[in-house]
Image: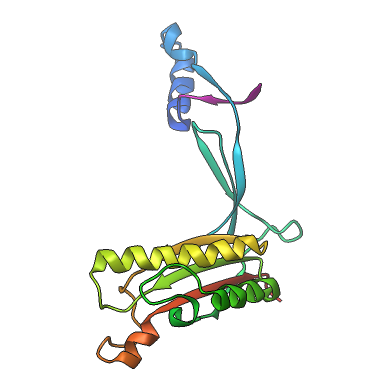
Amino acid sequence: MQFRTFSRLGTAASALVLAIATLGAVPAPLAAQEQVTVTGKINWGLWVDPDGCMHWWADGGVEGYMTPRRDPKTGQHMCLERNTCAVPNTDVLFATDSASLTPSGRAWLAQFFASAGAFAYAVYGHTDSRASDSYNQRLSQARADAVAQVARASGAVVDRVVGFGESRPVAPNNSAANMQKNRRVEIVCYRYPQ
């Protein structure tokens, strides 16, 4: 099954070959472009960049393609409003030093994603500084992944999931109360402008 044919020569190379061909100085093998037929599955979807602007993308395995999603009436690039819509403390969602959600944490997240009503979500995990950088990075990523899994199970679209470890504290890690503030999961909502 044929899906799309891509040229191995880029746009600039094609223009150069055309310019030289009109002068009559192109050897026959160089003037003909080699065609590659891509068969198989083409993946496609909608990507939301960190600023909330949407892009259609497709990738057939050889060459990808991305274009801005435009409003059909105005032609303007469609961008979503981005805001932090929840920042649950990880002490509420997870046991200490764990990326397994507590039953009450899982229930809270399921209820949140069922009622938030955003177009898409981003999930960012954070830790305090009590362990090594690499350990905190892995823990924050695993916790963000666990939250994103609940979101997807609720039917929500999760655009990105990132663990920041201890690199973005909201308070100095100099007291138990401040460290608790740093142990958090930020859920960012992308919504259509009103």
Farthest residue to the top: give it.
Answer: 28
Q: Is residue 122 above or below residue 84?
A: above
Left or right: where 30 falls relative to 149? left
Regarding residue 42, the answer to whether it shows in the image is: yes
* Residue at image point 51% right, 33% down: 61
Q: Magenta stretch? A: 1-8
* Residue at image point 40% right, 63% down: 141
* Quadrant including the N terminus: top right
* Residue at image point 55% right, 80% down: 86
Farthest residue to the right: give it.
Answer: 73
Image position, residue 194 (x, y; %): 71, 76
23 inside magenta stretch: no
Regarding residue 50, the answer to whether it shows in the image is: no
Work out whether residue 22 or residue 138 is closer to the camera in this orientation and state it: 138
Left or right: where 41 falls relative to 94? right
Q: Is residue 80 above or below residue 23?
A: below
Left or right: where 181 falls relative to 130? right
Image position, residue 124 (x, y; %): 45, 69
**Total number of numbered discs in the rendering:** 0
Q: Is residue 166 above or below residue 142?
A: below
Work out whether residue 167 or residue 92 is closer to the camera in this orientation and state it: 92
Left or right: where 73 falls relative to 164? right
Q: Could you tell me what secondary structure mostly forms the magenta stretch?
A: strand
3 inside magenta stretch: yes
